[in-house]
Amino acid sequence: MKKLLVPTAYVLLNSDLGTDESIISEIKQILAEEQIKFEIQGVYGVYDIVLKLSSDNAEKLRAVITNKIRRINKVQSTLTMMVIEEQENL
């Protein structure tokens, strides 16, 4: 039996030192305008920010990540993982 999931992406971001708060604020503004559901946290470790996005439209998620989030000033790099939309229960 297959379970249909809402298109979801996890984005890990590296930022310039001390810019996490301003980047998080900018991401919140972008996603509110785009009406995309999200969770965002600043973290310690290899990455500085973890972002979970979900929308009814997978193409919209890809476009926002590529054209808006990755282009934010002071974001050095990103790693994006798209959740498999259909997954068979074992």
Image (cartoon, grey):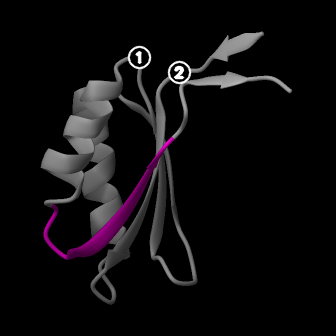
Q: Residue 42: x and y, percent?
A: 50, 69
Residue 42 seen in render: yes
Callout 1 secondary element: loop
Q: Is residue 73 magenta?
A: yes
Q: Is residue 70 above or below residue 20?
A: above
Label 2 crowding class (10 Å Cα cut-off): few <14, some 14-19, many 20+?
A: some
Amino acid type at circle 2 is Val
Q: Amino acid at mark 1?
A: Asp
Q: Secondary structure at mark 2?
A: loop
Report the front residue among 84 and 77.
84
Q: CA distance from mark 1 to mark 2?
A: 6 Å
As drawn, the label of residue 56 is 1
Residue 28 is situated, as x and y percent measured from the top left of the image, at 33, 47
Name the residue tied to disc 2.
6
**53 sits left or right of 89 in the view:** left
Task: Please say whether residue 17 is one of the residues in the magenta stretch.
Answer: no
Q: Residue furthest right?
A: 90
- Residue 25 occupies which quadrant of the picture? bottom left
Query: Decide: marks 1, 2 in contact (CB < 8 A)?
Result: yes
User: Does any portion of residue 35 appear in the rendered image?
Assistant: no
Q: Which residues are magenta?
A: 72-82
